[in-house]
Amino acid sequence: MDSPVIPTPPTPAVEQAAHAAHPAHLRHHFETVEQQKEAASFGMWLFLLTEIMFFGGMFAAYLIYRNWYFAAFADASKTLSIWLGGINTLVLITSSFTMAMGVWCAETRRRRGLVLSLALTILLGISFLGIKYNEYSEKFEKHHVPGASFSVETFVNPTADEMKNEKIVALAPDLAAKTEIYFSLYFAMTGMHALHMVIGIGILTVLLIKAWGGAYTNGHMTTIENFGLYWHFVDIVWIFLFPLLYLISRHV
Amino acid sequence: MTTIDEHHEHHIVSPKVYAVIFGILLLGTALTVWAAFTEMGWLNPVVAIAIACVKATLVILYFMHIRYSSTLMKLTVCAGFFTFMILIGMVMTDYISRAWGLW
Amino acid sequence: MSSAATPEQELTLPKRNFYNTEYGLLSWLLTGDHKRIAMLYLFSITFFFFVGGAMAGLIRLELLTPLPDLMASDTYNKVFTLHGIVMIFLFLVPSVPATLGNFLIPIMIGAKDLAFPKINLLSWYLYIAGASCFVISMVNGGVDTGWTFTTPLSTHYVNTNVLTTGIGVFIAGFSSVFTGLNFIVTIHRMRAPGMTWFRLPLFVWANYAASILMVLGTPVLAIAIVLVALERAFGIGVFDPTKGGDPLLFQHLFWFYSHPAVYIMILPGMGVISEVISTFSRKRVFGYAAVAFSSVAIAVFGFFVWAHHMYIMGLSNYSALVFSLLTMLVAVPSAIKIFNWSATLYKGSISFDTPMLYAFGFIGLFTIGGLTGVFLGSLGTDIHLTETYFIVAHFHFVMVGGMLMAFLAGIHFWWPKMTGRMYPEGLSKVAAVITFVGFIFTFFPQFILGYLGMPRRYHAYPPEFQVLNVLSTAGATVLGIGYLIPILYLAWSVKYGKVAGSNPWNATGLEWQIQSPPLTENFTEIPEVDHEAYDYEWLEHKNRQEVKSIG
């Protein structure tokens, strides 16, 4: 290991030969491509662990307040559209499928397939966000955004329409006030989720451009695989958010 | 060289598997919505979470390739969920014993 | 020559090392070399240590007299808040991992760099970004909620820079997460051939355990801060009691991180102590497996005890009992370490070099701090001692008497490896003793003050407490001097210190087998490890062989 002679840097010829022996994308601190791949995957999973704990805090808050203010949560949840929520769920699950297909295309060196899969994933992601925007603006109009302009009118004096179509029941004013907590959690959780989707779509766009140039169909598809992990994780968060936020007490 | 011998085959999951899982996920979604409209008392939230857990597990195992990954990756995922359960569980020891739906 | 086996020859610095492979500011600011990043961190955390120290100086100055005569109450609140925030997030959390860990872990395991060098650099930039937020907050008037950001004070009742500071905490948290992530992947995946888990130096085990805590715990702090920010900025309130929220929920989320955070801070320090004690007793660490597993045990159990910070905050009694019991459990692995280090010293060939002095200081002071932690962990005594100076003394004993001493031990131990030069031994010993004496005078009176009932975070107190406070401030002055002296001689040594050679301490470990300072790629060829950690016989054998070969 330690030689008494001061080590001399390798000659250019030696270095060139060494370089030729390994793929261009192998970083110098790794010994093999396999090691680099494993490390990258592991790193991505560890990052996803941090995301689990990040969202976990909000799930803990949700658990407590849903138990405390069940009637308010149930009522407030009814103002959300199951149709829009359900379609969004299907959209996101499909985007997970297209992303998984994208990974397969990268692994089997199908450049056009990869580009198509990524493009579809982006489109589905944007649709999700579009529907979300629609839902948010509806909440904004009805004064269900927590803060200064929050109004409990819907829950204290629901209109006949709301009582028939959305099955909203009238609540006592102090319980109705607790719907603000539901909406706080709704916006915090879906907002944080949407933020992750925006970031994901941004990265997807970059990946799409590079995939078009063949960057990921030449044997080095780690980036696509690892981004896929991120995208599936975002899907999993929504898989939990949907029943928890939209389907609280629809059977009543 | 890695000290631990992690030279498992790079398993390429086939689109057929993905399609099957995709189908199950769609069914699961439909099931969740149907269950939400069915009166099951205290079982309602349990069923909803259970279905969500199954869906999440399928995504993790197949879409995220954990089924075909090394033990280290499997342990890592478990560690994450374990810590999450500690957070939820031990926070709940406080709330269950002082304020169970009382407010 | 880079071998210490030829003392008669004049040692010179190796011609090529990681400092001179590239020149220029950008080569430092855009580096991927873990050693350069470690040095960047070293400068940054030292700078912020003195910022936090200045705050401490102001606190102690105010507390010289019983009356609130130096600053207004709000100002005092801001000073102790920023002291806590800067010291914890900008000094203690990154200190050993980001400087010594970054520098040494790849070398100790026989790798050329960490797994993700760019992410390593990103960690440093995130640190700087977070630190900048704190500076902006300070310049803008500070924040006065206490480093604990307790709701609803932080969400509704203060007009200070909670948002800016919160953003700083969030960003600095990510710095920590990425460092931990890097370490975990590196230690799992990049060990040299023959470097099995149980041949790793205990320093690596300690940083591994701390990294698990960083990765799993910090995000919960992040979400707690985000929710506070949302509540402050948009009224999206989950902690607001008037809207039906529970302020205690914030504390659950906050302490879920902040308790493991103290283990993030102390575990790497304990790793340093293992290395130093072994080297300066010329003996392998007693009970290697026990020390290694206890690091992991501290990390795991550390997640189960957070509500012992919340006993008087409205926690349920039954829950408090559970957490109290678990807190007793978490003390056990730490005690195991202390016993093992003591057993290492027993019948060892002990030399009192500066790192060893700091290590002795650590063992004594950390034990006291740790024991008082057990007093605080038990529900009954905590009711009386919490929120008094007893708590302040407790955590300063473990963090300053423990962690900071361990950090200084590590800096002195590995200084020759990082810079190629030795510091003046006499002066360093004097500084160590001054620090120890200053520390005792600063913080021991605070135990008494707390026991007698002086509340923490108050700048006015009953006159009968003045003597102890004056003693504490006097000690703080001595302590400050004790910390200033190393800055001076360490800086001096970089240019004028005696050249150290590759193994001035004749220590085991791969880092001592390479030149000082190391090459950028650490090793000219990846080592094959065939000996256990702390194998002094192997080292002996190797030294004899080397002398023969030079002849």
Image (cartoon, coloured by chain):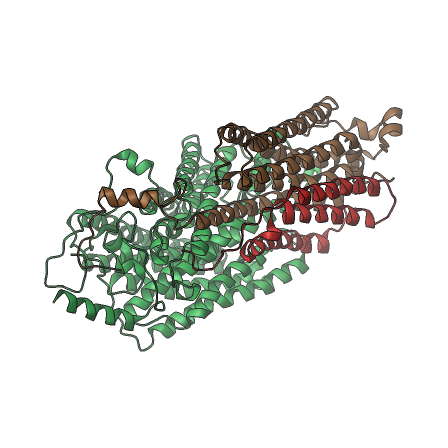
Answer with the quarter of the image where residue A182 lies.
top right
Viewed as shown, does residue C303 lie left or right of C353? right
Q: Quick one: which residue is furthest to the bottom in this view?
A: C347
As drawn, C112 above or below C286:
above
**x, y percentage for residue C514?**
25, 57
**Nearer to the camera, A103 or A189:** A103
**Nearer to the camera, C366 or A111:** A111
Q: Quadrant of the N terminus of chain C?
A: bottom left
As drawn, C513 above or below B41:
below
Q: Is residue C458 visible in the rendered structure shown here?
A: no
**Nearer to the camera, C377 or C238:** C238
Answer with the quarter of the image where residue C189 lies.
bottom left
Answer with the quarter of the image where residue A187 lies.
top right
Q: In which quarter of the image is the C terminus of chain C?
A: bottom left
**Nearer to the camera, C149 or A60:** A60
Q: Is residue C167 visible in the rendered structure shown here?
A: yes
**x, y percentage for residue C502?**
22, 58
Q: Chain B is drawn in which colour?
A: red
**x, y percentage for residue B22?**
71, 41
Q: Chain A is drawn in which colour?
A: brown
Question: Residue at coordinates 40% horizontally, 31% vertically from top-left?
Answer: C139
**x, y percentage for residue C182?**
44, 48
Viewed as shown, does residue A204 lie left or right of C8? right
Question: Residue at coordinates 27% horizontally, 71% vertically from top-left?
Answer: C350
Question: Residue at coordinates 40% horizontally, 61% vertically from top-left?
Answer: C270
Q: Colour of chain C?
A: green
Report the number of discs.
0
As drawn, C285 above or below C453:
below
